[in-house]
Image (cartoon, rainbow, N blue to C red):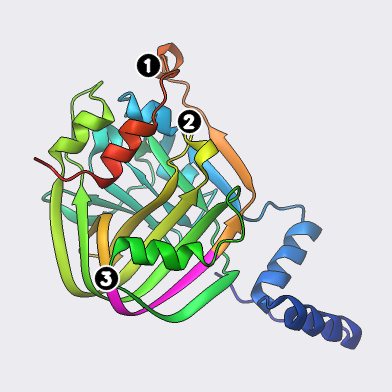
């Protein structure tokens, strides 16, 4: 995020504060929307590389470089070729969380098979909250959503009593997501400062996005993280923004062009999202 200073007429200043008071919006949000409209720039667009249906069918090959991904967003989640770890995009940096290799900044020229990013701009916040489980955190996020038909981004910062995570292990070409999820590594982090990067997608979007909540965690010191299975915090803040535009970049690989993606991915997505290894 960048800070810009300037002078505006008294009449605009008065109108701005009237708008803030009436709609309970932040000045950052109103000014960003106004500048985006004036400059003909998209704001709050969800940019997706590939689709959830392709991931379910085992299409994990490189489709877009990290450097290009970050041109479209500074906040989001994803994965890497052959499911080699979990991705967190936070404040414009893409991190790769891998089994055995910890956390590293993903190289700009690295190809990725799937990711979803946006430019995060706070619209609503709950600055002092607590939750004892993933479902309680989701309930707090539900209260910050105005619609079942828009996409939402959530940023949860704080000191977590516990965060249960999984990190995918690399799999062979063509391994379906449900089978790949059985090879994940789980860890529980306790009394850790960090950030949950979360997205919520409506049910109708299941063929190209993961429906419901999808959370990834990264510690404040950038040494630990993963896909969130459960979480609890007594001191946390939740910030949210709605997303009304979607841009999907489809891979042009031979595997994607020949793949049969007609199967409903919902069951496999639900299994992989919450699955614990046997």
First along the sequence among labels 1 and 2: 2
Mark 3 surroundings: few (<14), some (14-19) or many (≥20) residues within 10 A: many
**Residue 132, located in which quarter of the rendered image?**
bottom left
Asked whether 56 or 11 is in front, the reply is: 56
Judge depth for marks 1 and 2 and give the one in front.
Answer: 2
Q: Which mark is residue 232?
A: 3
Q: At 20% from the left edge and 60% from the top edge, which residue is drawn?
A: 164
Lateral position of residue 265 relative to residue 13, left or right: left
Q: Which residues are magenta?
A: 232-240
When the figure is inspected, residue 88 is found, relative to residue 60, above or below; the finding is below
C-alpha distance separating marks 2 and 3 = 30 Å
In the rendered image, is residue 91 in sight?
no
Quarter of the image with the N terminus in it: bottom right
Q: Position of residue 20 (x, y in %)?
A: 73, 80
Residue under label 1, please give it.
Answer: 255
Q: Is residue 139 left or right of residue 273?
A: right
User: Is 24 on the left or on the right of 105, as rendered?
Assistant: right
Q: Is residue 234 magenta?
A: yes
Residue 266 visible somewhere in the drawing: yes
Residue 207: image tag: 2
The answer to whether marks 2 and 3 mark residues whose Cβ atoms lie closer than 8 Å is no
Magenta span: chief secondary structure: strand
**Residue 278 screen position, x and y as percent:** 8, 40
Relative depth, front residue between 229 and 49: 229
Q: Disc 3 on helix, strand or loop?
A: strand
């Amino acid at each position: 995020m960048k800070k810009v200073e300037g002078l505006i007429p008294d009449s605009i200043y008065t109108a701005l504060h009237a708008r803030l008071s009436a709609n309970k919006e932040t000045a950052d949000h109103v000014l960003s929307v106004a500048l985006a409209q004036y400059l003909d720039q998209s704001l709050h667009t969800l940019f997706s590389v590939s689709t959830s249906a392709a991931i379910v069918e085992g299409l994990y090959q490189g489709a877009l470089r990290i450097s290009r991904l970050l041109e479209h967003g500074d906040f989001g989640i994803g994965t890497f070729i052959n499911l080699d770890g979990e991705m967190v995009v936070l404040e414009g940096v893409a991190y790769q969380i891998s089994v055995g290799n910890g956390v590293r900044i993903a190289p700009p020229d690295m190809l990725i098979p799937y990711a979803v990013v946006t430019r995060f701009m706070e619209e609503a916040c709950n600055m002092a909250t607590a939750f004892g489980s993933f479902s309680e955190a989701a309930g707090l996020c539900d209260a910050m959503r105005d619609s079942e038909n828009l996409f939402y981004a959530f940023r949860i910062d704080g000191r977590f009593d516990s965060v249960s995570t999984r990190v995918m292990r690399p799999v062979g070409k063509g391994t379906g997501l449900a089978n790949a999820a059985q090879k994940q590594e789980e860890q529980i982090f306790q009394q850790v400062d960090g950030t949950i990067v979360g997205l919520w997608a409506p049910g109708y979007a299941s063929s190209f996005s993961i429906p419901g909540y999808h959370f990834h965690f990264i510690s404040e010191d950038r040494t630990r993280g993963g896909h969130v299975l459960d979480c609890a915090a007594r001191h946390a803040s939740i910030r949210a923004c709605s997303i009304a535009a979607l841009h999907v970049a489809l891979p042009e690989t031979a595997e994607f062009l020949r793949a049969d993606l007609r199967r409903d991915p919902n069951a496999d997505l639900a299994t992989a999202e919450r699955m614990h290894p046997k």
